[in-house]
Amino acid sequence: MQRKLSLPIRGLTQRDIHDTFHQGRDGGKLHEATDILAPRGTPIEAVEDGVIQKLFLSKPGGLTVYEFDREGIFCYYYAHLDHYAAGLQEGMPVMRGDVIGYVGTTGNAPPQTPHLHFSIFKLGPEKHWWQGVPIDPYPVLVKLTR
Ligand SMILES: [Zn+2]
């Protein structure tokens, strides 16, 4: 992935980022995301310039954000948010580094383990926010910690 990205949480080190893309989850699904441990309330920042495509409350993900890049090639998914940034709305443009929400445990995250569940999807031609080909964020994130 050759993109101009920044970390979704400022000051992360490699230890905070868990290589869990291939782990199994309930219902025979794969995790297909990276979990980033951080204290509850830690600000979460947009990783690239783009648009807030969808704000969605899901049973597993809790409070979630789907951000598209400007061209609609990639979708960045942020889940288990404690709350959204004030004024965050669907269709809103964001810049890399803008705070979009705060780390929490909504959805199926363990209450004692606040974390950001982060994934990257390559969007298809239909640009559906709920569909895309998952890309492992772990190597992308680790590279950004250096
Ligand atoms: Zn996760």
Image: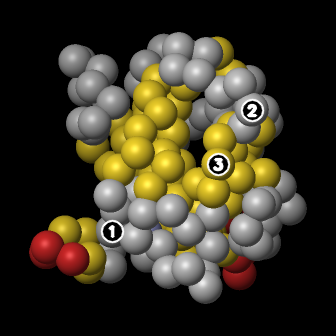
Q: Is residue 3 above or below residue 13?
A: above
- Residue at coordinates 44% horizontally, 28% vertically from top-left? 54
Q: Position of residue 65 (x, y in %)?
A: 51, 39
Quarter of the figure that contains the C terminus: bottom right
The image quadrant that residue 28 belongs to is bottom left
Q: Position of residue 62 (x, y in %)?
A: 44, 56
Sooner in the amino-acid sequence: mark 1 or mark 2: 1
Between marks 3 and 2, how big is the CA–CA gap?
9 Å
Q: What amino acid is found at the position of numbered circle 2 in the picture? A: Ala
Q: Position of residue 4 (x, y in %)?
A: 68, 33
Instruction: Say if mark 1 contacts mark 2, CB within 8 Å.
Output: no
What is the image's colouring?
A: secondary structure
Q: Is residue 131 above or below residue 15?
A: above
Q: Position of residue 22 (x, y in %)?
A: 32, 74
Q: Is mark 1 within 8 Å of ligand 1?
A: yes
Q: What amino acid is found at the position of numbered circle 3 in the picture? A: His
* Residue under numbered circle 1: 31
Report whether 138 appears left or right of 30.
right
Mark 3 nearby-residue class (10 Å; few <14, some 14–19, many ≥20): some
Q: Nearer the viewer, mark 1 or mark 2?
A: 2
Mark 2 nearby-residue class (10 Å; few <14, some 14–19, many ≥20): few
Q: What amino acid is found at the position of numbered circle 1 in the picture? A: His
**One can see residue 139 in this view:** no
What kind of element bears circle 3? strand
* Residue under numbered circle 3: 83
Instruction: Say if mark 3 contacts mark 2, CB within 8 Å.
Output: no
Q: Is residue 140 above or below residue 115?
A: above
* Residue under numbered circle 2: 86
Instruction: Say if mark 1 contacts mark 3, CB within 8 Å.
Output: no
What kind of element bears circle 2? loop
Sooner in the amino-acid sequence: mark 1 or mark 3: 1
